[in-house]
Amino acid sequence: MKMKVAILLGLFFYAITGVTQAQGNWNWPSDGKMESRAKELNAAYNDYMRADQYVAATKPLHWLLQNVPDLNEAIYINGVTVYAGAAKETQDEAKKKVYQDSVITIYEKRAEIYDNEAEWIQNKAFYAYNFYKADKEKVAEAAAMFERALELNNTLPVSMVGAYFDLIYRNYAYNDAYTPEEILAKYEQLSELLAEAEKKGEDISGSQGILDQLLVNMEIIDCNFIANNMGPKLAADPDNLQLAQQIFQYSIQYKCTDNPAFLSALETIDNNDPTFSTSQARGRRYLQSDNYAQAQEMFQKALGLAKTDTERGDAHMDLARMFSSQGRKSDARAAAQKAAEADPSKAADAWTMIGNLYMTSFNDCKGGQSRVKDQSIYIAAYHAFAKAGNNGGMAEAKARFPSKEEIFTEGHQVGDSISTGCWIGQTVSLDTRD
């Protein structure tokens, strides 16, 4: 798998700088010469460190780490500063890697001697990310440090969440390290951490955006994955709003809205946090499957949630289409008229629908006694199309008007009023097609 362009991660971690000396419990060697040497080199590396001469500081510090490893925790705290500084200071790539590895080794040695790993494991993970994120052989090691940080503290700072998932992304890209299910589980875990942070007032938008974009970049989600992996999970836990929102988002993104999992997700979302859009979308899905009772319920619900004239017009038009599908033409007309009243921009669609309802009602309405009366519904259709500005519909309707001969034969004149009868119930002025 080829890695896509990496996302620039703006990470803000704890500052790990400064000189640490006052740790207490100094374990100076009992041998006088060793004690003198240890004090000399301890002072030397501190002097170099204060002067930002980190490469020079590594030499006396290395002696202390090798010969008096339990001297004081300060040599490990400062050791990170020294070796990280040396890695930045040197231009030699081979030495840079040695210094970077030494930072991690110092943390590991510190864990062996001092029982306080939870206090600094996040800092270790921070360095590992910056040192190893582009290293195919060590990116998994860096990811493991973040996992250790989670294990010890049950959380990560918001600023580190994106870095951890970036390592997962890179490890997957470099080494095919995880299954899609494992990646999604990690994504969900980190998203939950961010959700908890957001409840405390933290801004998680940047970190959540990184997670979402990296998941897309991994290209593990498609319609089959949604149907066969995510769908069953939601079926087992139908109140899982977070999972439902993921399925909803991915179904739209990957054009999988015909997937049954999409409807299940939509139902969960609409039941827990209904909006005009969720109720409308749900109603339209029910309508596609001819589930008219539930479709009507959802369209009415959407109408109640509508906040704008546009939304109200949409809801009435949805109802009009549903009634039309059921053959409830009178109800369809009433809903279409309400749509045009609520949102004048829908007038053309609404009156075109009404015109078509009239055009398709000949067999329903013909009495068979007066051809002129039977054909009068087309005059009503013509006027509906005229309100819509639908010239094509007007022409089609006019072509079915009665002829002059038919009007004369039945004793009528052009301009006479006549009732269409039937459900249409319109009074029209007679006109002819010729």
Image (cartoon, rainbow, N blue to C red):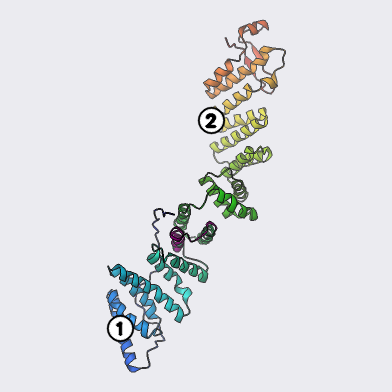
In this orientation, does residue 224 appear?
yes
Label 2 packing within 10 angstroms: few (<14), some (14-19), many (20+): some
Question: Toward the viewer: 345 or 190?
Answer: 190
Q: Which residues are magenta?
A: 160-181
Q: Is residue 35 above or below residue 269?
A: below
Q: Quadrant of the N terminus?
A: bottom left
Single out the mark in the foreground, 1 or 2: 1
From the image, tell me which residue sits under label 1: 43
The image position of residue 97, as x and y in percent, is: 34, 69
Q: Is residue 217 above or below residue 395?
A: below
Q: Is residue 347 left or right of residue 125?
A: right
Q: Is residue 295 left or right of residue 308?
A: right
Mark count: 2
Q: Does the magenta stretch mainly form a helix, a strand or a loop?
A: helix
Q: Quadrant of residue 83?
A: bottom left
Q: Is residue 427 left or right of residue 16?
A: right
Residue kind at label 1, given as amino acid type: Ala
Residue kind at label 2, given as amino acid type: Pro
From the image, tell me which residue sits under label 2: 344
Cα gap from disc 1 to disc 2, whole angstroms? 83 Å
Residue at position x 61%, y 46% from top? 260
The image position of residue 229, as x and y in percent, is: 58, 53
Residue at position x 43%, y 76% from top? 108
Instruction: Indicate which disc, 1 or 2, sits on the residue closer to the N terminus.
Output: 1
